Amino acid sequence: MQIDRRLISHFDWTLFLLSLTFVFIGVMTIYSANYNITEGHAGGLPSRQLIWLGFGLIAMLTAIAFDYHHIDRIAYPFYGIVLLLLILVLVIGHSGGGSQRWINLGFFRLQPSEPAKIAIVLMMAKYLQDDEPPRGYRLHDIWLPFALVGPLVVLTLVQPDLGTAIILGIVFLSMLLIGGLRLRSFLYLVGAGLALLPVGWHFLKSYQRARILTFLDPDRDPLGAGYHVIQSKIAIGSGRLFGKGYLHGTQNRLDFLPAQHTDFIFAVFSEEWGFVGCLVLLLLYVIMIAYCLRLMQRAKDRFGGLLVFGMVAIFFWHVVINVAMVSGIMPVVGVPLPMVSYGGSALASMMFAIGIMINVSMRRYIF
Amino acid sequence: MVVRTDINKQDGAPELRVRARLLYVILILALLGLTTRLAFLQIIQGERYTFLSENNRVRIKRIPGTRGMVLDRQGQLLIDSRPSFDLLFVPEDSEEPEKTLRLLARYLGRDDQELLTVLEENKKRPAFEELVLGRDVDWSTVVAVEAHQLDLPGVTLRTRPRRSYVQGPVAAHVLGYMGEIGLRQLKVLKDQGYVVGDEIGQYGLERRWEEVLRGQSGGQQVEVDALGRRVRVLHEVPDVPGYTVHLTLDRELQETAFEALNGKEGTIVALDVNSGAILAMVSTPAFDPNVFARGIKAEEWRDLVKDRLRPLSNRATQGQYPPGSTFKIIMTIAGLEEGVLQPEARIFDPGYYYFGNRAFRDWKKEGHGSVDLHKAIVQSCDVYFYQLGPRIGVDRIAKWARAFGLGEKSGVALDDERSGTVPDSDWKRKKYRQPWYPGETVSISIGQGYLTVTPLQLANMMAAVANGGTLYRPRIVSKVESVDGATVREYGPEKIRTIELKPTTLERLHEALADVVKEAGGTGGAARSTLVEIAGKTGTAQVVEMKGGYVKTEQLAYFNRDHAWFVSYAPVQNPQIAVVVLVEHGGHGGDAAAPLAKKVIEKYIALQNRPAGTQQVRAEGENRAN
């Protein structure tokens, strides 16, 4: 396959540089989150995140290299591989923090629930790419995606990783909606979902239930789950308008913040950069998402538009859920801040997603 | 390779374009929502959160649930939880930790070097972690620290309930002891909310009934000032005290039994014959569980573990001994029930019995002369039972022994109970791959050989003999109660089985056992009481086989001396209590064990007439619980 010269001239530098900005902010904040005042350094995590960035760039280039129309053919095999990995993780997986999410590959640990997010987008874009029925999809038109996505969600739930399962479900629903699900069918789905809530509750781990109950009633467990949210809120709130300055956050110093370099990294950032910093970061996300939405509108075909939408949905929901949970307006469900939180699999998956979007962006001029 | 080039789609997807407009709106709404939240936290409440963050003002104080009390059958305290104070220090809260500690030492009249060492040793730990300067400090320390609180930044007191075993070592083996949770235990019990440093029942009742006694820990989310002093409680989760456990033990009877053993190694078990309730269970030498409560020192622990007299073992449930002549009770029942034994028939005892070409000696060198069943029991004639044994056969003997609960765990709710051994031909085939030799039955007939029992099993056997054949499961806990006095669980009598016995069998046995104590020449004369009529049977369990003939107890090395047994029940007419005494290396049962059983039984009878002051004691117990 030849690389068209026009491709290079149409490379989407905006998207590429925006994504690098997030990684930069991430590495910087990871450094601060692990910074040890007395020892004067932050350990190996920031540089490891840079290594993941290297892997991420490879993933991104891979996603750009071929014409995105070929995804039509790789969507199901990709889904199959992810499904196998998710089964494998339960069998030989590595546990950490009470759940079994990683496969140990020696030099790094792969978290297959991250590429699962991508798999859902690829698969749904493929499934929904043809013209939609005149009055939209009815439920029985789309039983196949349900049958395919269901196992991914269940396998993630039993790890247990409630956060990722929620992301998987919500991205799936978003794609259905944008792809032309009938409104009435959607309402049926919502109704069925509500009816199944008590059943789902039954399958949650006790600590997950505790988090949700704590959210509904913050006074319920002030010594356990409630303590983490309080510490996170103190970190954010004490940042005030301009923050305490880089490396001058105090809450993370005493390990008061749980998971300060992963899911709670926004709290560390907020403490040091204040409301202004938060606004800048959120605006960066909004700019990027808006840019991608524009890209989706200008995509050459429905398939490309759906791909871009799926990837941008992943971004959007991660940001909203993460910031909401860290600032105490949603239960703590364990969702990373995209491209900023520490984590190799998540970063590589996100870079791959951006690669796909750049791919669609570049090829909208080529017929 | 087919690349989709559908002409219709070259304009993109207009429907997506339309829907995307809605997405911009959603995006802006989300941004507004999150920004509002952040503004609320960082601008409107920013001052308050800054205040909380500046001094790391929110701390968690965990308050372990007060462990449940343990009461005896009269509601008298056996284990209490009293408040105690630990002296803590958080180095970070003090600007000059060393100066603060010097000052503290001065206030306490202690050597400051001692306190500074603690600081030095923990230098590597984070400065916000509390150091324990002293556990269970005395009242004057508490007063001094409270009074000088302002000069002593970082110094705090932590209240902690401490276990207090009212009688010290008296019921040590039943009650058990507490200890810090081990790493392996923690791994298993993490889900149940245990954390490093928690105390957990490690032995006896404390361990077996951990779940019930434990309670739930609570805690406080506390706002503290820069000096580590509590400003206010932000949130509080009250701790839930553990349940109160009522035992079947009688504190006073237990005391009497402990005193009766008077420092000898041995054990006394007293059971209510009509319910299986354990009234007393003493094992000596004992240990003091209070030592564990205050934190046992390494050398104290080593001494306990290495002691040749095994003070940590509960001889009543874990000691396995040959029953000696007390087993003649089972032999009598087996003989009569199987129709092998003619009680009136007499045999002649010359002092020995030949089986094959081996001579089995009677304990009485010159023999008992002409003996029938009654005399054989009363005077504990060995030869009579030697010749009876092979006629019944080991398998039928084993059947009757097992019917009375020998050779199986009684199922009492205490840890690590042993089962003893009731051998039969099957057992020997499995264990040694050898047939049973009839000569071995001869040894079994007087309770020697492979046969071993626990004192609790013998007591339970005696209770079943006394009540006419009902074997109850021995019980130690009668009731579990919540702090407000509501009954949570109740444990009534539990029948293991009813043993069908002919009335004549029981009649003959009861009469003979009474005469062991009552009749002149009976081996149990030392248990004769003026207060109550006692029935019993002596036993002497050989520790080493004496091939050479008759040796006086005093001439043997201590650890080779025989164990002395006495099994008994009283009153003869309407049995209520069964008492078993074992004195290790005590020599003859009649001399060493019978008088102890008498003391316990007499005390029991005296307690029956105890004045009605018990109600008051109960009330006292309940007050303490609140």
Image (cartoon, helix red, strand yellow):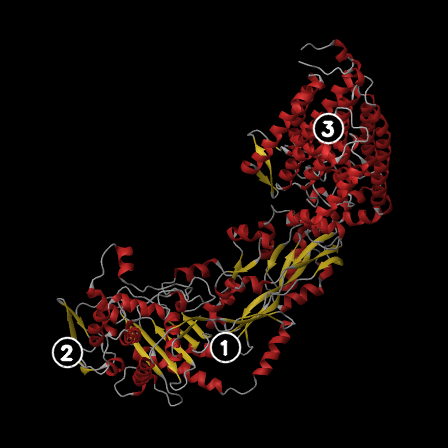
Q: Secondary structure at mark 2?
A: loop
The structure residue drawn at horizontal position 25% and vertical position 74%, both measured from the top left corner, is B554
State whether residue B460 is above or below residue A349.
below
Residue B554 can be seen, yes or no: yes
Query: Depth check: A367 or A365 in front?
Result: A367
Mark 1 nearby-residue class (10 Å; few <14, some 14–19, many ≥20): many
The numbered mark 1 sits on a residue in which chain? B
Question: In the rendered image, which quarter is residue A334 located in?
Answer: top right
Mark 2 nearby-residue class (10 Å; few <14, some 14–19, many ≥20): some
The N terminus of chain B: image quadrant: top right
Residue linked to disc 1:
B251
Query: Depth check: A304 or B70 in front?
Result: A304
Residues under labels 2 and 3: Cα distance? 103 Å
Residues under labels 3 and 1: Cα distance? 72 Å
Residue linked to disc 2:
B350
The numbered mark 2 sits on a residue in which chain? B
Q: Residue B526 in the image: x percent, y percent?
A: 32, 84
Residue B265 can be seen, yes or no: no
Q: Secondary structure at mark 3?
A: helix
Q: Amino acid at mark 3?
A: Val
Q: Amino acid at mark 2?
A: Pro
Of the image marks 2 and 1, the number of the one nearer the N terminus: 1
Q: Residue B572 in the image: x percent, y percent?
A: 38, 85
B500 lies left or right of A307: left
The structure residue drawn at horizontal position 65% and vertical position 24%, both measured from the top left corner, is A55
Q: Amino acid at mark 1?
A: Arg
Residue linked to disc 3:
A23
Question: In the rendered image, which quarter is residue B211 located in?
Answer: bottom right
